[in-house]
């Protein structure tokens, strides 16, 4: 495992606190309905989210990031805790419904279970708290408040549960008994965590500065690219440059590969993609797999010349560019060809259109050869040169390369979105159906009742007969 691949949580999201009542009630929900598939599904979400939230302590988060790339936007593993907390809250609501249904009945089984769970969880909380206290060097200056929070909220839950068990008249007001405890728990938790989530206004001022430079249009007018996001907008571990339309070579990107990271160690390669002039032409290029051997040869030849050379990679092989494995044996012919390549040269390019899913440029090339555009390659990109479709190959491991002819060329890269609008329509239709379903069921029930009442020939005796079990 690579411990530096995914960063860990900072102190503001380094803990998971579900709350006293949600935890107790969620366990009660499972005990009450152990055969409910829906409730166990929620438990599964809680368990999976917590397994992701602990970061590199378990491999679950890495598996999720590998097989579901969109989840990589959860920069800190602690962000997964929100799903656990929300699912526990849903379970707690189900338990609250069970309690409300039990209020009119004289049986005490659910109330006894509530007391047992409250007592067991409170004892577990005390043990966990004691363990942490004895293994932390710096306890801070809020230890007494933490002690009060432990005693008042956790044992307060036990006390409320006992009252509801012993006093049947109090059960119909159980929500009012829970409410002060929930408010107290939330208030003390907020006070105790304030030290970890406040930074004298810096976090507030940073979005304000970024918003001041926010650009509404999704277009760029030139190829200017910086190495990292500047410190005033968050530094290297941020992606705040997106709203500013500021292109950077390194930022808080979720789509990383080993070659992209290693460009930083080789200035000749790094300068390929920096500045305003980052379109390159090469008469000759070597076609080879994106292996570690080829990368080393690229570095060696480029540093010998003091300027980059160009190697290109077929599309099927580029799909595996982030794999850490290399071919068993180097391709001696390709490596020898790389060692004889001549340096690529910058060529001036005019931006015709530059949006997130479309790049169109006008470029003049000295002869037939290869054009290297130093934007990231992805399998979905398609290309045209002078109106004719061309294959978009990988260039120097992370960029895009296409064939061009001598003279002026109009080169376009576009990212088709065949299902985009269909999926958006499906998403909104699903959301509308979810909100409309309860009303539709009520309408169906009302229409069915009206039809039954208006059916001719249905006597009172017939109606009575239908009610006989």
Image (cartoon, rainbow, N blue to C red):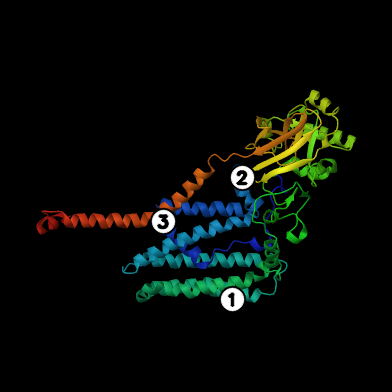
Q: Is there a contact, CB below 8 Å, between mark 1 and mark 3?
A: no
Question: How far apart are labels 2 and 3 at the CA level?
Answer: 30 Å
- Residue 115 sits above or below residue 433 on the image: below
Q: Secondary structure at mark 2?
A: helix
Q: Secondary structure at mark 1?
A: helix
Residue 451 lies, in percent from the top left, at: 20, 54
Question: How far apart are labels 1 and 3 at the CA level?
Answer: 43 Å
User: Disc 2 designates what residue?
Assistant: 69
The disc label shown at residue 148, or none:
1
Q: Residue at x 82, y 32 (%)?
A: 297
Which of pointers 1 and 2 indicates the residue nearer the eye? Answer: 2
Q: Is residue 323 left or right of residue 151?
A: right
Q: Residue at x 56, y 66 (%)?
A: 125
- Residue 319 sits above or below residue 469 on the image: above
User: Disc 3 designates what residue?
Assistant: 435
Near-viewer residue (59 or 424): 424
Residue 29 lies, in percent from the top left, at: 43, 60
Q: Is there a contact, CB below 8 Å, between mark 1 and mark 2?
A: no
Label 3 neighbour load within 10 Å: few <14, some 14-19, many 20+: few
Which of pointers 2 and 3 indicates the residue nearer the eye? Answer: 3
The disc label shown at residue 249, or none:
none
* Disc nearer the start of the sequence (1/3): 1
Label 1 neighbour load within 10 Å: few <14, some 14-19, many 20+: few
Residue 57 lies, in percent from the top left, at: 65, 51
Label 2 neighbour load within 10 Å: few <14, some 14-19, many 20+: few
Which of the image's four quarters has the N terminus? Answer: top right
Kindly give the residue lying farthest to the front in the view shown.
408
């Amino acid at each position: 495992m690579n411990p530096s691949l995914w960063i860990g949580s900072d102190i503001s999201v380094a803990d998971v606190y579900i709350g006293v009542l949600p935890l107790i009630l969620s366990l009660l929900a499972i005990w009450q309905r152990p055969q409910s598939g829906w409730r166990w599904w929620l438990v599964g979400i809680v368990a999976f989210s917590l397994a992701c939230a602990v970061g590199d302590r378990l491999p679950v988060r890495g598996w999720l990031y590998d097989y579901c790339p969109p989840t990589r936007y959860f920069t800190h593993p602690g962000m997964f805790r929100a799903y656990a907390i929300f699912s526990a809250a849903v379970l707690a609501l189900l338990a609250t419904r069970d309690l409300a249904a039990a209020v009119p009945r004289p049986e005490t089984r659910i109330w006894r279970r509530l007391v047992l769970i409250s007592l067991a969880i409170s004892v577990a909380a005390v043990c966990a708290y004691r363990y942490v206290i004895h293994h932390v060097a710096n306890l801070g200056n809020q230890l007494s408040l933490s002690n009060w929070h432990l005693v008042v909220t956790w044992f307060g839950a036990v006390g409320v549960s006992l009252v509801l068990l012993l006093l049947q008249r109090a059960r119909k007001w159980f929500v009012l008994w829970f409410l002060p405890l929930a408010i107290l728990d939330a208030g003390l938790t907020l006070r105790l965590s304030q030290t970890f989530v406040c930074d004298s206004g810096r976090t507030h001022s940073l979005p304000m500065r970024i918003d001041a430079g926010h650009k509404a249009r999704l277009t760029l007018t030139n190829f200017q690219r910086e190495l990292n996001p500047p410190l005033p907008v968050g530094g290297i571990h941020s992606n705040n440059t997106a709203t500013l339309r500021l292109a950077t070579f390194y930022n808080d990107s979720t789509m990383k590969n080993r070659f992209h990271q290693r460009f930083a160690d080789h200035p000749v390669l790094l300068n390929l993609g920096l500045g305003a002039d980052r379109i390159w032409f090469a008469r000759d290029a070597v076609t080879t797999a994106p292996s570690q051997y080829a990368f080393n040869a690229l570095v060696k030849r480029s540093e010998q010349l003091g300027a980059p050379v160009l190697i290109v990679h077929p599309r099927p092989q580029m799909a595996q560019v982030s794999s850490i494995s290399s071919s068993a044996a180097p391709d001696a012919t390709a490596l020898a060809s790389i060692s004889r390549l001549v340096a690529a040269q910058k060529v001036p390019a005019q931006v015709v259109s530059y949006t997130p899913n479309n790049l169109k440029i006008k470029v003049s090339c000295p002869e037939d050869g290869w054009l290297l555009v130093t934007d990231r390659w992805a399998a979905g990109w398609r290309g045209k040169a002078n109106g004719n479709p061309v294959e978009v190959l990988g260039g120097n491991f992370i960029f895009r390369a296409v064939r061009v002819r001598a003279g002026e060329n109009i080169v376009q890269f576009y990212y088709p979105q065949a299902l985009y609008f269909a999926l958006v329509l499906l998403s909104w239709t699903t959301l509308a159906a979810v909100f409309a379903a309860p009303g539709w069921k009520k309408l169906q029930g009302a229409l069915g009742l009206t039809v039954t009442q208006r059916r001719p020939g249905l006597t009172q005796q017939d109606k009575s007969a239908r009610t006989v079990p």
